[in-house]
Image: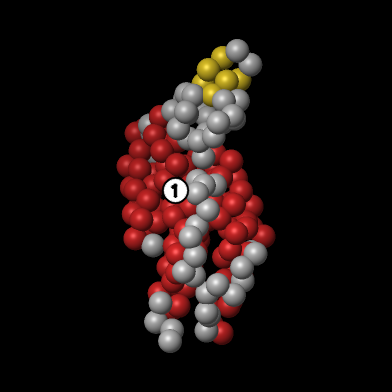
Amino acid sequence: MQQARANQALGDYLFQHFCTKIEERREEFWCHVVAQCQQSVEKAMKALICFGNLDFPKTHRADQLLFFLLKRPNILRFKDENLKKLSILFGASEKQIVIQLSDLAPQKDTTKRNTEYPFRVGKTWIAPATANLFTFAELQLFLKHSRRIVFITSQIVSATSFLP
């Protein structure tokens, strides 16, 4: 969980320092904010799997990690109050954000928008740091949901680590 929280803190820092003040916006940093959101969600999913004492799949796609967890609902021992947190974490809106962020992780497909590698649109190569590639609304949405996922995952991991 420490790594997930660190990625989230870096995303928040970049957003606060390079994205919020209109006169000081640096859109070339926006891909890095999205990347940190994706990384924090990926690391949170891996933390849940590790606390279930399983080896996590070797992937950077948080959605694959989430679906791996959903196929193994009993890997973590939960107190009743944590079941509600788990249902929020695995709810429809959070699943959709996890899928969207996973689609933005670097991939072999050079035609898909991502946060790290140049990609093709027709015959033109586009850098992830290109202005207007990510919208301010996307940044806000991804930050909101990644914060929530990291927070809830932290609560679940903390609660389950103290169970007999």
Where's the C terminus, which quadrant? bottom left
- Residue at 56% in and 55% down: 65
Q: Position of residue 126 (x, y in %)?
A: 51, 21
Give the residue type that dot 1 points to.
Answer: Gln
Q: Which of 140 and 39 is in front in this view?
A: 39
Label 1, secondary structure: give it: helix
Q: Position of residue 61 (x, y in %)?
A: 54, 47
Where's the N terminus, which quadrant? bottom left
Q: How crowded is mark 1: few (under 14 residues within 10 Å), some or many (20 or more)?
A: many
Residue where numbered disc 1 is placed: 39
**Is residue 126 in view from this perspective?**
yes
Q: Nearer the viewer, residue 153 or 141?
A: 153
- In terms of image quadrants, where is residue 32? top left
Above or below, comparing residue 28 to residue 103 in the picture: above
Above or below, comparing residue 89 to residue 159 in the picture: above
Q: Position of residue 97 (x, y in %)?
A: 59, 51
Q: Position of residue 113 (x, y in %)?
A: 56, 31
- Residue at 64% in and 52% down: 96
- Residue at 39% in and 53% down: 8
- Residue at 49% in and 70% down: 52
Name of the residue lying farthest toward the front: 55
